[in-house]
Image (cartoon, rainbow, N blue to C red):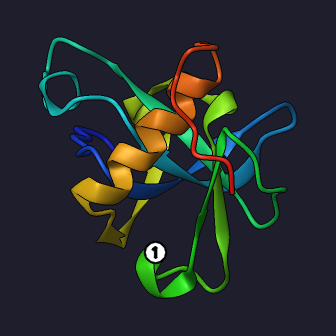
Amino acid sequence: MTTNVFPRRGEIWTASLGNPPIRHWVLVVSLDGRNLSDKRDTVLIVPLSSSGPAGATVVPLPPGETGLPGPSFVKGHFIQSFSKRGLLDRERRVLSNTRMREVVMAIRRSFDPDAPWPER
């Protein structure tokens, strides 16, 4: 387990989630003011999945963008607060600001019926 973890927005990490814990890739979505603060011990994350139906709260990510072995899907409806100390390993890639705006909109659509969503 990593100590003195200061993740940044848009980074992909591994973390043990669930009960029993299973290792997952997660995307840090909280603002860096929170992430880099030594007074805050949690960050906001969204777990990544290897599958996912297209939808208002799901953002597909190709492996070339994430550096992960296969396609990933950000499921904005699974946003959660998570202990910084629970983050295990940082991956090499960071999502772009443009992609993070898409993720934020997917999260927003999970609770805001008025959030825009271009039908595909």
Closer-to-camera residue (61/19): 61
Q: Residue 92 in the image: state x and y as whole percent.
A: 32, 75
Give above or below for 118 relative to 95.
Answer: above
Q: Quadrant of residue 93?
A: bottom left
Query: Callout 1: helix, strand or loop?
Result: helix
Give above or below for 23 relative to 56.
Answer: below
| 40 left or right of 46 in image | left
Q: Amino acid at mark 1?
A: Thr
User: Residue, x 85% and y 31% (percent of image)?
Assistant: 19
Q: Residue 37 in the image: state x and y as whole percent.
A: 13, 22
Closer-to-camera residue (77/85): 77
Give above or below for 49 relative to 80.
Answer: below
Q: Residue furthest front?
A: 119
Q: Residue 13 in the image: state x and y as whole percent.
A: 45, 56
Q: Quadrant of residue 76?
A: top right
User: Residue, x 14% and y 21% (percent of image)?
Assistant: 38
Q: Which residue is mark 1?
A: 66
| 88 left or right of 120 in image | left
Q: Quadrant of residue 9?
A: top left
| 82 left or right of 70 in image | left
- Answer whether residue 1 is visible to the viewer in this image: no
User: Residue, x 63% and y 45% (percent of image)?
Assistant: 47
User: Residue, x 69% and y 57% (percent of image)?
Assistant: 120
**Label 1 neighbourhood size at 10 Å, few (<14), some (14-19), many (20+)?**
some
Closer-to-camera residue (21/119): 119
Q: Residue 81 in the image: state x and y as whole percent.
A: 51, 20
